Image (cartoon, grey):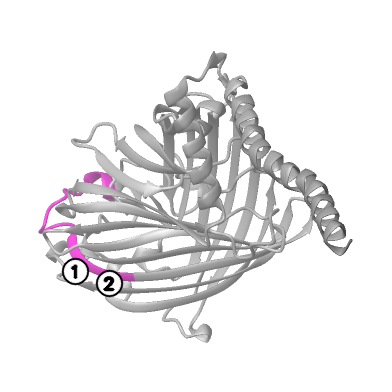
Amino acid sequence: MLKNFLISAGIAALISASPVKAQKQREFITQPLEKAETSSDTISKKKEVIIVDGRELNERQLKRYYRQLRRDSIRAHKNIWWSVLGGPSYTPEASLGVGGAILASFRLNKKDTISQRSFLPAGLNLSLNGTIVVAGAGTFFFNENKFRIYASYGYRNEPAHYYGKGMSIAENIERSDSTTKYHRNYFQIYPRFVWEIRPHFYIGGLFELNYTKATQINPVMLKDTYFNKYDSTYLNVGIGGLIQYDTRDDVATPSKGVLLSANFKMFGKYLGGNYNYEILELEYRQFKNIFRPRSTLAWIAKSQIGMGDIPFTELPTFGSPFDLRGYYMGKYRDKSMAYGIIEYRHMFGSPAKYKSGNFWAKCGFVVWGGTASIGNSPFDWNKWKLNYGAGIRIQMQPGKNFRLDVGKEPGQPGMQVYMNMTEAF
């Protein structure tokens, strides 16, 4: 009896366990089939189609497109995004050397996605005759674009030229080692702080410190009346205020908008400097998109009016990498100055082409023409000098270009070459 009961119980247990085991076996077999079915569905899906400028990207272009998106995403979230470009350089003052430009862009607060990326460029030049130049102008954005710091800086240890004060003297003096050349050590730091008080309206303060040491002075300079009014080594310290109306869509490389700016600087012995003088600066810039996207017409009008005992290196002048490119730096200087430039900027390709990683869409060119005058006062702006030039652009970061410009002073031999990051204005 007991034996029969145990046999019956064993048979029942085997029967009840079989469906469970079979179910587990079915699950084990079915799982790969489900995966295979999912994989098959993925393969059978239609490939993603991306159209750029009316054309479907091929497989190679798609890889480049996604690679560019990945790079931009990674770089945009980097604390600092560095760009470097350079090569051989030559200028009449510096002779043969190595020049280049460095750009760092960053967000001062990663949670602040409204502010533009802050940027700090630097132009560099090291040459065979011992020239060392480091200079640049950057902008720092805070608090959702409501607070900005514009910062200009420069260090120059180089052969330089002084042509005298005034248009007629500069035009008639011969440029040579015995008439205009001297050696200059120069340092400047010039920050401006502005707060947005109403949409697009900014007010703020500024501070400037500059130092000059002139050596190896030529015989003509030693007889120059204006040069002899001042020491060959001096320090200037100034403070002031500024007001701006700014609707530009981007500070580094605007494509539309207006900038109206006025500032007043006071330098004095009471601040620790060597001389007392003041400079009023007025500026108007405008940018307009024309013809097509990434095509901009830009123009600027700027003037500086000085008062007091202004040392010769601080007199208003034109001919820098940021205005009439093509003139010897500091050739034309006087108590007041004004210039105007109109410039056409063109980047190849469309915004979609650039985003897809197309190389030529990172390249472009500019052409410009300008005019300027100097005088003891604005009433003496009766002779205007002309200027023209062209350059190439390589977009190193979104909205930030490396520029190589070649400018010309009509009627004079040779041209001037400039390498820098961000636009001239």
Residue located 48% across and 23% down the image: 349
Residue 274 % position (x, y): 41, 81
| Magenta-colored span | 170-186
Q: Nearer the viewer, residue 56 or 278?
A: 56
Res 360 → quadrant? top left
Q: Secondary structure at mark 2?
A: helix
Residue 111 % position (x, y): 69, 62
- Which residue is identified by label 1? 222
- Which residue is identified by label 2? 228
Instruction: Classify the position of the N terminus by image quarter.
Output: bottom right
Residue 371 % position (x, y): 43, 36
Would residue 386 be visible to someone looking at this image?
Answer: no
Which residue is farthest front?
A: 1
Residue 299 % position (x, y): 54, 35
Check if mark 1's residue and mark 2's residue have beta carbons within 8 Å: yes
Q: Nearer the viewer, residue 144 or 324?
A: 144
Horizontal side of 164 relative to 189 (left or right) equals left
Task: Indicate whether 224 appears above or below 267.
Answer: above
Q: Nearer the viewer, residue 85 or 156?
A: 85
Q: Nearer the viewer, residue 160 or 405?
A: 405
In magenta segment, residue 181:
yes
